[in-house]
Amino acid sequence: MNNTRKIFLLLAFITLFNDSSSAQIKDPQVEAMMTHRVLTCDDIYYNSITLIPQLYRAKKADTADAVNEYWQKNCGMTEASVAFAILHAIEKRTFWEGLNNVYKSPGRGSKPVQEEYYKSNIISYLNSNYDFFNIQYEPWQYKTFYYSAYVEYSNFIRSMAGSLLDMKGLSPVERFLVDYYADPSPFKLTRLTDSVYNGTLIQHAYKKGREFGGFSYGMSVGQWHPLGNLSILGDHVTTGCFIGGRSKGFWFNIPVGLSFGNAPNYYYTKNGDSVYNTNHFFGYLIGLDFGQALYRTRRTELAVIAGMAYEGAEVLYIQDETGDKKDILKNINTLNLNGGLEYKLYLRHVRKTDKYLDSYLALQARYNLVNYKNTGGTDLSGNTLTFSLIWGGYSRSYQKKKFGQ
């Protein structure tokens, strides 16, 4: 019995000793076993933009192609990978208007899907190329090695495109792409409306991307400036909001506006059998506006506008403080027919790797034909000018946002 107990205690001691020893070497052992690793897309992105220029300059373009395809297959299409794929295809005389989206599984490798993907994304990639390769972010927003790699890859793409500028026999689309990548500029995209690109997928994509269609909304502040006899009411601060819609370069809005502040001068108005001397003023408006773009770039737009509205003004308000009588209140109103110009500046937003424009600041000036009747009081005939600063936006599908228009 005693021998059995001794054997048991010895085994227990050996077990505890082994456990203690293994605990002491556990971490190094585990770390030594960690020989397998999975490349993240950050790893692949960084290695790709580093390797592709090195391989291409070493006359190993086919290997650079393989790296680029691996990048796209595992992490999706990016503006950087698309730039090299397009330029190398042009160099090899194998370019056609399509992008082989190897990352997407539905319809992979079929030419119609490649063409549809190209039409849906090429303008977005060109815009992103300009935004990213111009490095519009501050260096501190990137790790140092990432930032230097971005700059180097950007210079490589521009140099590669520049070397193809004198290539003979380029089609209009090929020449446009080479010229764009050699010196990216959003203003170059406006060339795609030229007749030389008629029937091309890139022109179709550009025009589609500029349609903007969708629900619109916005707010405004400004100034109401009366003319003629109406000028006795003086200038007033205005504020308002609107909702509407847009299709291509045409848009419509339903605005609601208010004007604040007493008039700087007193004037007469008749209410019932009494004539009052007042400087009270409170304006309001609800209308329907239309606009048509006259000139557009990627980030700006000049439009002609026209509209009609029901406009009114509260010109008399005397509150009965006793509560025995009703307040004395008078409104005058008019039909407002107006026209003018509007200049928009579209704002850039960032969401992950995509940049798009879906809101704007605008300056607007209108001439308004109005006809206020103040029967029995001061003549308030005259028209008005209105000036507005507007913030607005469009609620569009993600597909349209990707065009960066």
Image (cartoon, rainbow, N blue to C red):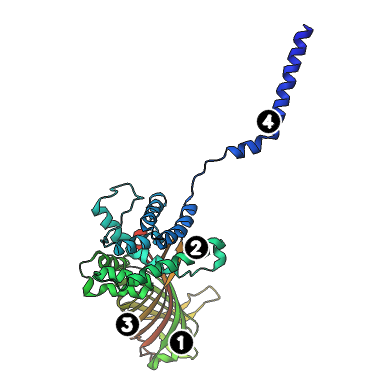
Residue placed under numbered mark 1 in the picture: 235
**Could you tell me the amino acid type at mark 1?**
Asp
Disc 1 residue crowd, few under 14, some 14–19, many 20+, Cα 10 Å? many
Residue type at the position of mark 2: Ala
Does residue 18 appear left or right of residue 166 in this picture? right
In space, the residues marked 4 and 1 are separated at their CA atoms by 86 Å
Disc 4/disc 2 C-alpha distance (Å): 44 Å
Question: Which of pointers 4 and 3 lies earlier in the amino acid sequence?
Answer: 4
Which one is in front, 142 or 309? 142
Mark 4 or mark 1: whose residue is earlier in sequence: 4
Task: Choose the circle earlier in sequence order: 3 or 2.
Answer: 2
For the residues labelled 3 and 2, the Cα–Cα distance comes to 55 Å
Q: Residue furthest right?
A: 2
Asked whether disc 1 touches disc 3, contact meaning CB atoms under 8 Å apart, the reply is no
- Amino acid type for the residue under numbered disc 4: Ser
| Residue at image point 31% right, 54% down | 100
Residue labelled with disc 4: 22
Dot 2 alpha-carbon crowd within 10 angstroms: few under 14, some 14 to 19, many 20 or more: some
Q: Position of residue 82 (x, y in %)?
A: 36, 60
The residue labelled by disc 3 is 338
Badge number at residue 149: 2
